[in-house]
Amino acid sequence: MLTPLASLRTGLELRLTVESRAWLHRALAEAADTKTGAGTTASATGADTTASATGPGTAENTAGPRGLPAWELHFVTAGRNCRPAERHAQAGHDVVDAARVLLLHAAAPGTDTVVRLYERGSADERRAVLLALPHLDPPPGTPRALALVEDALRTNDTRLVAAALGPYAATHLDAHQWRQGVLKCLFTGVPVDAVAGLEHRAAGDGELARMLTDYARERSAAGRTVPEDLHRVLRLARFENT
Amino acid sequence: MPSEIRRIFDPHIHMTSRTTDDYAAMYDVGVRALVEPSFWLGQPRTSPASFYDYFDALLGWEPFRAAQYGIAHHCTLALNPKEANDPRCVPVLEELPRYLLKDGVVAVGEIGYDAMTPAEDSALAAQLELALAHGLPALVHTPHRDKAAGLARTLDVLRESKLPPERVVLDHLNETTVGPAADSGCWLGFSIYPDTKMDPDRMVRILRVHGTERVLVNSAADWGRSDPLKTAHVGEAMLAAGFDEDAVDQVLWRNPVAFYGQSGRLRLEAAPPAEQLYQGNSVLRGGE
C-alpha cells in the first residue's frame, strides 16, 4: 500500500505537463540532497537551479537572495514552474500545493526553517506549510508549529483556514481553539469536510453543541438560513445518529 | 449585434483602498484581471516592517478578495519614489529581492521620480537592477509635478540601465509626454481619472494619433478621488469613436497581458474565457 505522500506524488505527476514533471523531479532531487547535506544554494555563482522553467526571466537562476538553498527557491517559485497539463487546467492550485508539500517533505527542514518559510511566505506558500505539517519528518516542534496554525485561523482567508484545520490541528489544537475553528468554518463558508478528525473530535462535545445551537438561534433570529453543515456537526456533538 | 467590450485587464489599480462593491462593479463591466502596484498609502510609513505587511497583503489577502469576485490579481513590488526619501524606509530594499521571487509578482514598481531627489535617483537605479536580475518588467511612475523634466530624467536613467525598453512601462503619461515616451521604445501607460491625469475622450484622441500598440490604459484607482471603472469608460469611448472591438480588446486586454506576460508569472485562470462573457456568465462570482 502506498503512503499518503507516495499517492500524492503519483497523482501529481499524472496531472503535470512534461516540462513541469521534469522540474518536479529536479526540485525533489535537490530537496533530498539538502536533507543529506549535499544541497546547492541559489548563490550568485551561476548555479543553474531554475533556468529551464522560468521562461523569459532566464536571469532568475542567479537572482535569489544569496545563500538561499535551491530547494527553497523551488518552493517559492512552484506556482509558475509546476503547471497542470491542459486537460487538468482546473487543478492549478491543487497541483502547486501538492508540489510544495512534497518539496517540504523531501527537504526535511528543521522547525526554524518551517517557521521562516511560513512567515516569509505568500498565502499560497503558507497554505503549503500548513498542509505539510502532519507529514514532516522530523516533526516540527509542537508549540511553534501550532503557532502557525493559530496564525492561519486568525485570518479570514478561507483557503488558509481550511488548510489550518487539517490532521495537525486535529491532533494538537486545544478544545477551545478547535471549536472556534469549526465555528469559523460555518461563519466563512468553509465546508466542514475540510476539518480533519471532525467525527472523532466533535463526538459528545457538549460545549461545541451549545455554541452551534446559539449560532443557529442567532441565524434564525436574523431570518437567515442555518447551514446544513451546522446541523451535521450538531448531530455529531450530540451523539445523534447521522 | 452592437460592439462591446469583451474583457478588461486593469494594469494599474490599488485595490487595497477599494471595497468589495468596487470588485463587483468591475466584474460587471468586464474586468477579469488586474495588477496592483505597491505605492504610497496616503499615510507615510515609518519602518520597513510596514512595507512587509503591505507586500504580504498584496501576495495573500488581496488576491483572495479578488478571486471571490472572479478577478485574477497580480502585483508589482517596490520602494515607491516618495518614500525613497525617508531613510527609515530605505532598508526595505534589502528585503525586496526575496519578495520579487514570489509567484504573484509580475513587475518591479512603482518606481521612478516624485520630487527628483538624489535619494530617488539611487532607489530608481537600484530597483531597475533588481528588475533585470529577476527577469521582471518595470512599472515606472512619471512625476505629477514637473512631469516633462521628470520624464527626461527618467529616460536618462533608463538608458544607463541595462533593462531593455520593451520591459518598461512609463505610466501617467499625457499629451505633453507621450511623444518622447513613445520615441524611447518603452510601453506607454495612461491613467484615467475623474478630474486630473487623463480622461476617456483625451485618451481616444491620443490613440488616434499614436495607434493602439504598446499602449496600456489604467484607472490607477486608489484612496483619492478616482474611479475603478475608467478602463471600461475608455473602451466605450473608443467604440463610440469608431474603433472596433479588436482594437478595444488589444488596448484593454492583450497589451497588458503581453507586457506583464514577460514576467512568465501571469495566471489568468480566475478569468473565464472571453466567449462566456457574451452570455453574461457570472459563475465565477464566488462566495454567493
Image (tube, coloured by chain):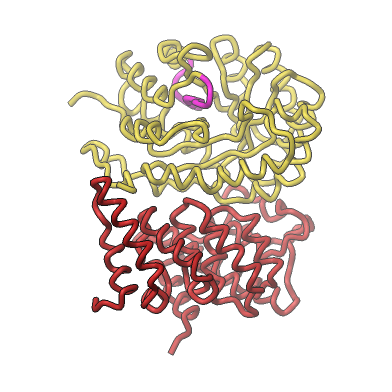
Residue A83's spot in the image, x, y percent?
Answer: 47, 59
Residue B247 higher or lower than A210, as above or below: above
Residue B213 higher or lower than A209, as above or below: above
For residue B278, say whether it is visible.
yes
Nearer the observer, B65 or A221: A221
* Stretch of the chain drawn in magenta: B210-224
Is B60 on the left-hand or right-hand side of A35? left
Find chain B in the image and tell me its colour: yellow
Find chain A in the image and tell me its colour: red
Nearer the observer, B282 or B217: B282
Which residue appears at 41% of the width and 46% of the height?
B67
Is A2 on the left-hand or right-hand side of A103? left
- B221 falls in the magenta region: yes
Residue B101's spot in the image, x, y percent?
Answer: 64, 50
Is A113 on the left-hand or right-hand side of B8? right
Which residue appears at 74% of the width and 64% of the height?
A41
Query: How many callouts does the rendering have?
Result: 0
Residue A31's spot in the image, x, y percent?
Answer: 65, 72
Which residue appears at 67% of the width and 40% of the height?
B51
- B179 falls in the magenta region: no
